[in-house]
Amino acid sequence: MIILLHLDAGPAERAAVRAALQKLGLEVEEARLGERTAFWVEGADLPPESVARLPGVEKVVPLGGRAPLVESTRVPGGRPVRVGGACFGGGQVAVIAGPCTVEEPAALREVARFVAQAGAAALRGGVFKVRTSPHNYQGGGASALRDLAAAAHETGLPFFTELSDPRQVAEVADVADGLQIGARHMQNFPLLIEAARAGKPLLLKRHMSADVDEWLLAVEYVLKAGNEQVILCERGLRSAEKHVRYLLDIGVVPWLKQRIGLPVIVDPSHSAGDWRLVGPLARAAVAAGADGLIIEVHHRPETTRCDAQQALPFADFARLMHDVRALAALDGRGLAGAQPSTPPPLQRAAGA
């Protein structure tokens, strides 16, 4: 870093700043920048704002610094992430579909069979639900996890489910193909690290109030923990508007695709909050270059205990999948399938 002193800093002030920097264990080299005295400091392990507090210092200019790990993912063609038999990125559009929450096993199996037949690449379902109100349904826990694993095994689809606590990681990672970190836990750094160390693909949603840099820094925690299998998911931002639940940032998809190589998918269900808007938003996301979608689907939305208003009925999901296939083909991409003909062996959650 370069440390600029005040323009009127005399010999005594320069000596005091030099002594303060050396006391911090820094190697200091003095230089002149026009009429101004500056110090060149190499190998500083202090943030610039700390050094700027020294008396006599006017400004600190950081030079270089460590390149974010997420920048290293930018490679020609992107860096696909495989989740079971599904592929996210690499010229494919993968759709994750299923109910918001796992409730009745028979209903779950019906939804799973339908989305698999319609061309979904992976199954979704909530077992540890994160709800705004503590009085709302919180999910079925371990028994729901077993039901979800059984439905996924029956259809041959890999499955994702959301984590909300580091203590859930081992139990879920034992059976799930992919781990999901929801928007509210984007900056739950202990959870990010623990989930990353499980070695499973990680789907990381953007917080409804987070800017892109904060989102990418959350990704950085996962990459630093040694897990490069990250899928980013845009799900909408909080705003003053009332016509949708959250404002979907479609523009972030091509912006990220130009800067990083990790797959970027979109959740139109949570952003819309209205099943009638899910299809148009999903189509817009694919047209913008999204590597996939995560869609809430239910055969009888009026019976579900969670997010009934945004769940797509079967007929609408089938129509959407037809359109996604056509839109993907416009730029030479295909619809990623999970090839469910060879289902993996069924594992049991802990305590089953």
Image (cartoon, grey):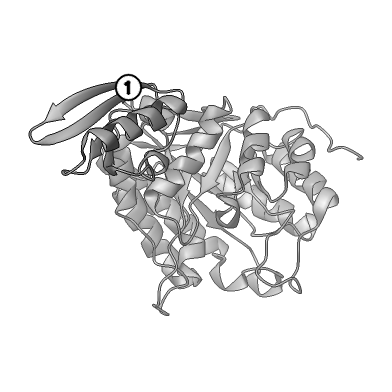
Say left or right for 247 vs 177: left
Residue 183 drawn at (x, y percent): 55, 55
Q: Amino acid at mark 1?
A: Val
Residue pictured at 29% horizontal, 43% vertical:
56
- Quadrant (top left/top right/bottom left/bottom right) for the C terminus: top right
**Residue under the image location 40 percent in, 57 percent down:** 282
> Where 213 falls versus 311 (above or below)?
above
Looking at the image, which is closer to me, 351 or 345? 351
The answer to whether 235 appears left or right of 196 in the picture is left
User: In what quadrant of the picture does the N terminus appear?
Assistant: top left
Q: Is residue 88 visible?
A: yes
Would you place residue 84 above or below residue 321 in this image? above
Query: For residue 73, which quarter of the picture?
Result: top left
- Position of residue 64 in the picture relative to residue 109 (left or right): left
Q: Nearer the viewer, residue 87 or 206?
A: 206
Determine the residue positioned at 28% across, 38% down: 13
How many tags in the picture? 1
Residue 300: image location, x then y, percent: 66, 69
Asked whether residue 177 is in view, the answer is no
Furthest residue in direction bottom, as rendered: 242
Reading the image, the residue beneath label 1 is 28
Q: Residues within 10 Å of mark 1 (few under 14, many from 20)?
A: some
**Residue 175 as seen in the image, left or right of residue 31:** right
- Place residue 49 in its image quadrant: top left
The kind of secondary structure element at disc 1 is strand
Residue at the far right: name it.
Answer: 351
Rendering quarter of residue 28: top left
Residue 59's spot in the image, x, y percent? 26, 43
Nearer to the camera, 92 or 66: 66
